[in-house]
Structure formats: structure tokens, C-alpha cells
Image: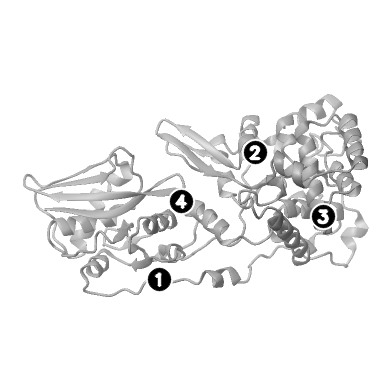
Amino acid sequence: MLSKVCSAALNGIEAYPVEVEVNVGYGDTNIVIVGLPDTAVKESRDRVTTALSNSGYKFPMGRTTINLAPADVKKEGPSFDLPIAIGMLAASEQIQTDQLEAFVLVGELALNGAVRSCKGVLPVALRARQEGKTGVLVPVENAAEAAVVAGLQVIPVQNLREAAQFLEGQIKIAPTRVDVSEIFDQPSEEDLDFAEVKGQESVKRALEIAAAGGHNVILIGPPGTGKSMLARRLPTILPPLTLEEALETTKIHSIVGLLAPGQALVTRRPFRAPHHTASDAGLLGGNINPTPGEISLAHHGVLFLDELPEFKRSVLETLRQPLEEGRVTISRAAGTMIFPSQFMLVAAMNPTPDGRMPGESRSSPREIQNYLGRVSGPLLDRIDLHVEVPPVKFREIATDRAGETSAQIRERVVAARRRQQERFRHKPKITCNARMGPRELKQFCQLDETTRELLKNAMTEYHLSARAYDRILKVARTIADLAGANTLAADHVLEAIQFRSLDRQLWF
């Protein structure tokens, strides 16, 4: 007898439907899986047969053929265990149900029949709703994740027998429901705050501008000045994720398997800090079967690269396309994958090879130049703010006066973002000033004659590139938004110009 069970597989960060066809026929007892299964799928044969036996069902006699359609796309992972097992039960007439077309099934089976969690359940649930399915049968640990998709019954199952009895109508299982607004309203557990940072008011101001406009920033200073401390507190002043952003971020984390059991959504902006020994594939994503890398895991959040010159130059150069386009394109023999990567880049580096300030360094000018040369000019052009982080003075360290809290700074950042949302309300792809293109720069960053002449002199004197010109205008627009100004003034542009220190070659 032939049975068909609906399941799904992942392609990039999206899911596509997979039909699990099971036929139990005559011949020697054997199980054959076709449809380009990988090793984990092939091994499901042993997991499923043992789980069937331990769940009190009979092993189908004769030749059992399992086809995963479409047959020309490689299938990966153990999430097909549950649909294969249900298909074998239906094909051998051990269960009678008409619900197989209505539900999408995913889940890994333990040898005792328990249903274990699997990756990528949120994209599967979104695809099931798109296909017009009634609901999904998922492991209990993944139920909250799938339940954020409205208009879909999410049935949590603990074991194979429970899933079979539900499909037969012998038992009822209450669908999992989550209140998305309640998830977003949960208090943050962050224990980091800008109030803990002593001094460095100019650096805090730069990070506030970066957060308000979504700009990339590089922090330059000797060791012990608080570069990492400041960078790790940047997410605390970023605006909260919208539901759409949270869904996109959660999809990526679900695919990689970073969601905690029972976690429904990623509601805090990600902060990723890969080590400087990270490879191209680790940062971009890739391998034989491409999966998201660190820059995609930082989508809608912060990617922090400490000790920037210590990264391999080839790794750093891979950042140029994602910084410009907000996505990563990975081409392999198996196909092309596109992963989103709209992140804020925060980099930190020492001013010289020995970490001292240029006037105190024992390194020669050529050694300093070679050290800074590890970071290419085109990459620095794509970083909007170059911020010098000086040593903290003793009186600032010893003071008991607390600085501004993250909550206070965040209020100004959120107010500036609201102005940008209003400005770009007819341009949904532009979410902040850093994403403006040439048309938006021309429309929203107009300069008067005095300010234009000032910027012209800076471009000539500091030999700034055309890309640096655009970055200055974007940063100036953000400074104006923080000040509540509708037009760009000379002081906005002057403050933006001072954040191009590496263009001005102050360290040589």
C-alpha cells in the first residue's frame, strides 16, 4: 500500500515542501530510501525501525520504498524520521487517518520512540501556512517557535505513538499558543549598562550616533581604554526589534540550532564576536552545504571584530559585499544560497603594533603603516565612524559620579529612528540613514552654499573618496536627527567629518 506524508526541508533560510512517499510491497524485507538523502537521512532507516518496535508497532514485512520528493534536491538532517515512521504505519495499515494531507510533520526519533527537537522549525511553519496546511506536528521543544506563526495549529508531540494516535483521532492535543506581544514585553535580562563606563564621553557620543543611524564604527585606541567594554554595551542602546525583524533573526538562529528549548522568538538584537582566527566560511557561511555564518547570525544586530588587523586579510575582504548590499551570496556546486546580513559592524584595533599611542610607540613609521595596512582602504571606506579611544584619566576612573544609563541614551536613539521611519515611510527597504542610496542622499541631505564649501575643502585637504563623502552625509543626517533638525547645518557636517580619522592618516 502507498501512503503520502507532508514534510519540509530547508534551502538557505527558507523551507520548501517535501512529500514523503512510502510504499510497502512484496519481496524480501528491506527498506530503501531514495530522493537524494544525505547520511543522516539514510540512517533514519535504523532509527525509525527501532522506534516503531519500541512503540508497540509491527515492522512492515516486504520491500519498503521511501521516496523524498522532489527527488532532485538533496535532503539533509534527521527531521524526516517522524514523517517516515508515520508513512510506514499508514502504508502498512497499522493506522487509519485522513489527516496526512492537512499537517506537516517534522521531528527526529529516539530509539524509544520519543520525538526530539530539530532545526529550522520556524521556516517550516511559515511554509506550511503558505501552502494552506491546517497545522504542523513538531517536537515539544520546538512548539513555541512554530506557534508565533498566526493562523496555524501547532501540535506538540512527545513520542511516535502520541503523534499516530492524534492523527487517527484517538486523542486530542491542545495546540500550542504564544502571545507575541507578551514575549516582547518581557523584561530584559541584560546586565550591561553604559553607566558602568567611566569617562570616554566622546566615544559614547559616537556610539550613540552609530546606533541612531545604523552606522558602522571602528574604535582605535591602546589596550585597556575600554574598546571592548563599550562595544559590548552597544546593543543596550539599539532600538527594539520589530516583529518582522524578530522573525527574520529567529529563522536564522533556528536553522543553525541556536534557539534554546522552548524559545519562541529572538527578541534582543544579536551580538556576535567571532575570534580573529575565524575562517572565510565561519564568517560568511558556506561549507559543502551552505549554512549561515557569523555575519548572518548578526542580522539586525551587531558584529564585533576585536583586534581587526589580526584577522586574515582575505576574511576581512569578504565583508565588503555584505556591508554594501546587506546580504551574502554563496555559490557552490549544489546551488546558490543567499543569506541576509544587515548588521552594524563594530571593529576595534590598536593604533600601533605594540599597542601604544603613535608618539609613545617603539614601532617605526613603516611598521605602523604596515600594521594599519592590514585593513584595506575599501573596507575602511565602508566604515562610517572612525573613533579614537584615548586612555582614561585617573580622575574619571576614581569618580563616584555615574554616567548616563543605557535607557537614557536609548530614548534619544529611538526618537531619531522614528524620524527616519517617517522619512522613509514610502521606502520599505530603507530602515535607517546608513541604508540610504544616492537618490535618498540627494533628497534628504541637501547642503547650503556655506556648508557645501566647507565639505569641499575637507574633501580636498584630507583626500577623501567619493564613498567617504556619502558616509559623511549619512552621519551628518543622523546627527541632525538626534538634534531634531530637519535640515543639515554646518555643525552637523563638521562633527561628521571628524569621524574620518583614518582617512586623514592621523597615525602616520
Residue of label 1: 176
Query: How dense is the environment of label 1, judged by Cα within 10 Å: few (below 14), some, or many (20 and up)?
Result: some
Dot 4 lies on which element?
A: helix
Tell me the amino acid under the disc marked 2. Answer: Glu
> Which of these two is toward me, 330 or 390?
330
Residue of label 2: 324
> Where in the figure is residue 386, as x and y percent of width and height?
80, 42
Residue of label 3: 486
Residue of label 4: 255
Tell me the amino acid under the disc marked 4. Answer: Ile
> Which of these two is toward me, 200 or 444?
444
Cα gap from disc 1 to disc 4, whole angstroms: 21 Å
Left of 442 or right of it: where is 281? left
The residue most toward the left is 26
> Which of these two is toward me, 477 or 104?
477
Cα gap from disc 2 to disc 1, whole angstroms: 40 Å
Above or below 54: residue 248: above
Q: Earlier in the sequence, mark 1 or mark 3?
A: 1
The residue most toward the top is 366
Tell me the amino acid under the disc marked 3. Answer: Asn
Residue 504: image tag: none
Tell me the amino acid under the disc marked 1. Answer: Thr
Query: How dense is the environment of label 4, judged by Cα within 10 Å: few (below 14), some, or many (20 and up)?
Result: many
Q: Earlier in the sequence, mark 4 or mark 3?
A: 4
Q: Quadrant of the C terminus?
A: top right
